[in-house]
């Protein structure tokens, strides 16, 4: 995977970004948010939609990078637009199905809408069918299905059915902030599962005892050369988007 990433393979870069964000294979203290942001930025520059969305959320939340809500929203809109364009290109009949373009958040999620129902402004992307899972993800899903979906004692799989990524330690993945009943390895998986399944099942619940919300302040802000490097990456992404 590292060799593929060195050769600018976008999916490999994004997979490494997820590993860095989660600290997979190590402890919670082994997370490297700045590395995750940098890898996501590189993958996004190469056209990886999920990486572009991940980067947008990082900027919007100030997660591993200095907070910039306006830029974060812009990247999210770009990710949604590219995702929709890909679907309409591969499935021309999609334009006839208005339900794919409709976005009606549930009552307890309406704060996400920010006063608009435009699907391109959704944090979760447009309501379009998810792409077929990668063969590697399909293999992982089938592999753990034979083990009753349990990768190990106290460990969980990503709740996105097309992912199959297992936790390497307890509570590694993020939980749904509303119900706390599902968990995801990445923002991309959260968005795909929301559109395909979870939006019809999610209901508010009592806050769970083990609060896994990330402390954004503790993550710190990028400064010095690190901030300059990441900001240069954003400029490259913006230039790439403008040229496409």
Image: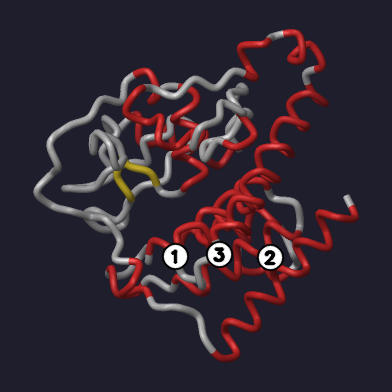
Disc 2 secondary structure class = helix
Q: In 3D space, how far apart are the residues under numbered discs 1 and 3 (Cα atoms)?
A: 10 Å
Q: Is residue 47 visible?
A: yes
Seen at 39% across and 78% down, the residue is 220
- In the rendered image, which residue does mark 1 sit on? 63
| Residue 152 placement (x, y as % from top left) | 23, 47
141 or 218, nearer to the observer: 218
The quadrant in which the N terminus is found is bottom right
**Sequence-wise first label, 1 or 2:** 2
Q: Residues within 10 Å of mark 2 (few under 14, many from 20)?
A: many
Asked whether residue 140 is in view, the answer is no
Q: Is residue 62 left or right of residue 203?
A: right
Instruction: Say which quarter of the image contains residue 241.
Output: bottom right
Circle 3 residue: 68
Determine the residue positioned at 69% across, 50% down: 48
Dot 1 alpha-carbon crowd within 10 angstroms: few under 14, some 14 to 19, many 20 or more: many
2 or 3: mark nearer the eye: 3
- Residue at horizontal 71%, vertical 30%? 84
Label drawn at residue 42: 2
State the SS at label 3: loop
Q: Quick one: which residue is furthest to the bottom in this view? A: 224
Residue 215 coordinates in the image, percent (x, y): 29, 66
Tell me the number on the disc at residue 140.
none
Q: Assign a secondary structure to mark 1.
A: loop
Structural crowding at the residue carrying mark 3, measured as other residues with C-alpha within 10 Å and reported as few (<14), some (14–19) or many (≥20): some
Q: Are marks 1 and 3 in contact (CB under 8 Å)?
A: no
* Residue 33 placement (x, y as % from top left): 45, 70
Name the N-terminal-most of marks 2 and 3. 2
Image position of 202 (left or right of 60)? left
Q: Nearer the viewer, mark 1 or mark 3?
A: 3
Residue 24 sits in which quadrant? bottom left
Check whether the beta carbons of the residues at disc 2 and disc 3 lie within 8 A of each other: no
């Amino acid at each position: 995977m590292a060799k593929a990433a060195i050769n600018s393979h976008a999916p490999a870069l994004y997979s490494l970004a997820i590993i860095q964000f989660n600290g997979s294979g190590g402890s919670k203290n082994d997370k490297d948010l700045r590395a995750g942001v940098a890898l996501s930025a590189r993958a996004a520059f190469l056209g990886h939609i999920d990486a572009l969305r991940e980067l947008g959320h990082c900027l919007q939340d100030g997660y591993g990078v200095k907070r910039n809500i306006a830029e974060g929203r812009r990247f999210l809109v770009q990710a949604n637009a590219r995702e929709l364009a890909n679907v309409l290109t591969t499935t021309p009949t999609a334009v006839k199905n208005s339900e794919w373009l409709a976005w009606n958040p549930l009552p307890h999620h309406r704060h996400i809408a920010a006063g608009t129902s435009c699907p391109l402004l959704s944090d979760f992307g447009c309501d379009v069918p998810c792409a077929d899972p990668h063969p590697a993800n399909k293999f992982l899903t089938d592999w753990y299905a034979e083990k009753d979906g349990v990768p190990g004692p106290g460990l969980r799989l990503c709740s996105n059915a097309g992912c199959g990524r297992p936790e390497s330690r307890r509570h590694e993945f993020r939980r749904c902030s509303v119900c706390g009943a599902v968990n995801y390895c990445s923002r991309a998986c959260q968005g795909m599962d929301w559109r395909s399944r979870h939006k019809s099942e999610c209901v508010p619940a009592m806050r769970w005892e083990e609060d896994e919300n990330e402390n954004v302040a503790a993550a710190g802000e990028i400064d010095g050369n690190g901030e300059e490097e990441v900001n240069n990456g954003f400029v490259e992404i913006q230039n790439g988007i403008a040229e496409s």
